[in-house]
Image: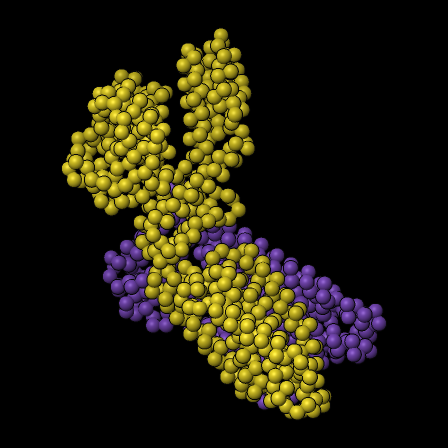
Amino acid sequence: MYKNLRWKILIIVAVATLAVWAFMPPSERVKLGLDLKGGIHLVLKVETQEALMAETETAREQVREAARTAGITVATARTTGPTEFEIGGVPAASEAQFRQLAEQQVGGSFDRESIGDGAYRFRMRVNIAANRRDEAVRQAHITIEKRVNELGVSEPIVAPYGTTGDRIVVQLPGVYDVNHAKSIIRKTARLEIKLVEGGPAADEPSLLAKYNGQAPDDMEVVPGVSPTPGDLARSFYLVKRTAVIVGTDLRTARESVDEFNQPAVAFTLNRDGVTKFSKATGENVGRLLAIILDDVVVSAPSIRERIPSAEARITGVSRPEAADLSLVLRSGALPASLTWLEQREVGPSLGRDSVAAGITAALGGLGFVVLFMLGYYRLAGINAFVSIGLNLVILLGFMAYIGAVMTLPGVAGFILTIGMGVDSNVLIFERIREELGTNKGARQAIGAGFDRVFRTIVDTHVASLIAAAFLFQFGTGPIRGFATTLFFGLVSNVFTAVFVSRTLFEFILSRKPAGAVRLSI
Amino acid sequence: MRILSNPNFNFIRWRWHAVVLSLAVIATGAATIYQRGGLPLGVDFSGGTLILLKFEQPTGEEAVRQALAPVASEAVVQQSGTEGNEIMVRLPVEAGVEQGAKLEEAAIRVMDAITAANVGTIVDSSKDIVGPVIGEDLKRKGILATVTALGGILVYIGLRFRFSFAAGAIVATFHDILVTLAMLTWFGYDISLNVVAAILTIAGYSVNDTIVVFDRVRENQRHVRREPLEQVVNRSVNQTLARTIITAGTTFLAVFALYLYGGEVLRGMAFTLLVGIVTGTYSTVFIAAAIAIILSPRPPGQVTQAQARAARA
């Protein structure tokens, strides 16, 4: 009668085997979310305005420098916004030449507009600005990724977050020292080497005395450490705005020691860097060179001779600082600073407690449901147990196969899947009972029961699937785990409650005489 | 074994009573929510800090509250955990966060104060610190997800059933969500991300439950076309009653296990599901069917050929 029975059973066994194979061994294959494993979840914002500002200032200096080289003295050059700068007081005689020079220098990315009296406003093109923003976020993303990887965290996540385009989510499972993690991620690590024009001085006024208290346009004041080792007093340096060496000229950085065997960070320069460095040192023998990290002078050695080699050192750091600093220098500088928007930490034992609680709840729920089904539907209860149990096995296998993350709400998803399984089974069993009540034979009753209920099961599952799908859209982290579990639980429930359960009934019937009317249900 | 053999309760007779009862619950809930100045949003949506501390020994919440009084008077302290050794501290969002102030400043202050007051040895802790920007973002997304999910279900029901039935299912679903929100407010549960997920699940469950009855109505109408709608609906509710009770009962108990053993983090979610299961079952029997009948064309009892055909579609 049921000639396909053998094939159906084979399919079921194959699916079950595949599912079990997919999540074996569970400790390796089932990925736990942060809420179960413990760890840190951070959402941060890249301050893209800063990157634009830096770009604008560089452009401004380029234009001014080009004008100066051509013998045009401009009266003012100031940045008026993140994407805007103005140059004023261009002598009337050289305006045409100035315009040509400006076009050459920044024409590709800035629109120029004359605002009268030899003054010009430069505004970064909108598409260029958008581009720079994206670039800054992308660079921050890559930099953070490198740093996180160097921290040696297993399975960290660094990913874009939300729709604003400037947010990044960082997840570090198994990391509990949030302050250390944040300081590593956030360290701007902008390394610059600049020529010292004046100082060190104890305060700003004495440094600027010979410039009438105002730093010249092409120079800036940077605070820093005293050149005498061991002197803790703060001092100030007047340095050239344009850096000799910037972070991108760096090849690598590592922990090292200085000549007094104190911890230090040694860094080497790439070919470009070496060329620039050797030229600058050759031209400025006897002057001081400031090594500036994140706008603070960390050391200011004097140039004794032209330095053709490619290694330099940052001294005066502690050993852990040296390790962190070399890490962040290696991973490159962040293009802009970061702001923390969200921070979640789950302690290790609280994660473990949650796993235990979740498993207890799921097993308790399952145990109760199975007892009830066996008591109420007798042998058909075994049927329900097999289909619900298989549903959970398939779900777990599928989660492991696609690498979905198991979260605490995901555990709730498992429990609801048990609920859905019960619902479908009860729906079918009650219908079979009803059909048996109309004096149908067991075979017809089962056939009619499954056929009539199938449509209802499809309707109910589609409605719930719609809810789960939208939930997934909305979700971050834990909620996604819930939505994923619910979604695939529903899909596999259609298979187990309808196909598997029916096959089981058919299997039982196939061992009974053809006209059987009794059924343990 | 059978819970009910051939039940024949006249549910439909009680439809107006049910509608009035539900409206009363929802109105009272709305009044409470209004009086408290809005829904009790958790830190996920309002922004702020939620700290869960696990102590070595059971620790009273009063001791923690006293320790925090000088540094964080606005902190809400609550004891939790099965052994009474867990304390939850909730703080509102810090002013100036995102303008350079430290996001975790409040959390640090709380941890320092508790350590200094020596209330007990902290074994482990979890912290959720949500800045106002992310809170707003999650709120927007949460509302969007709820509205779109309900919209999606509505469209599906609209396609599968005729108007009065689709309306009944949707009204029942909204009813369940509103009653759940009222219960959450009364029982002092904050609306967190997990609770929103649970509410959406309730929406799915409620519709699910309703569809089972409506599918039966549709099937019965195909067999007996001349029967008054009230009778068909009532018979369908009775025919599926055993299933409704068993499913609701078992699911309720499974979720109850989650409520008891699932730990602090899932308690709000489990509570939401428990309420949703009860109200979902009630609304299927009383609200969805009642609305479907109320909205069906008058005079009642005369199902025309056209309607029967429409019902089949």
Horizontal side, residue B173 vs residue A365: left or right = right
Q: How is the image coloured?
A: by chain
Above or below — where is A520 with respect to A93?
below
Q: Residue furthest top?
A: A93
**Residue in the picture at 22% in, 43% down:** A318
Q: Where A42 falls versus B193 (above or below)? A: above
Q: Image point 33% across, 26% down: which residue?
A: A275
Q: Percent position (x, y) of residue B33? A: 53, 61
Name the tint of chain B in the rendering. purple
Percent across and percent down for residue A480 are 51, 59
* Quarter of the rendering occupied by the C terminus of chain A: bottom right
Q: Nearer the viewer, residue B39 or A236?
A: A236
Q: Residue at x 51, y 15 (%)?
A: A100
| Quadrant in which the N terminus of chain A appears | bottom right
Which residue is depicted at the point 28% across and 69% down?
B57
Q: What chain is colored yellow?
A: A
Left or right of A142, for residue A369: right
Q: How many marks?
A: 0
Q: Is residue A509 above or below residue A497?
A: below
Foreground: B41 or A459? A459
The percent position of residue A224, horizontal first and vertical second, equals: 25, 32
Question: Can you see residue B77?
Answer: no
Q: Is residue A389 visible?
A: yes
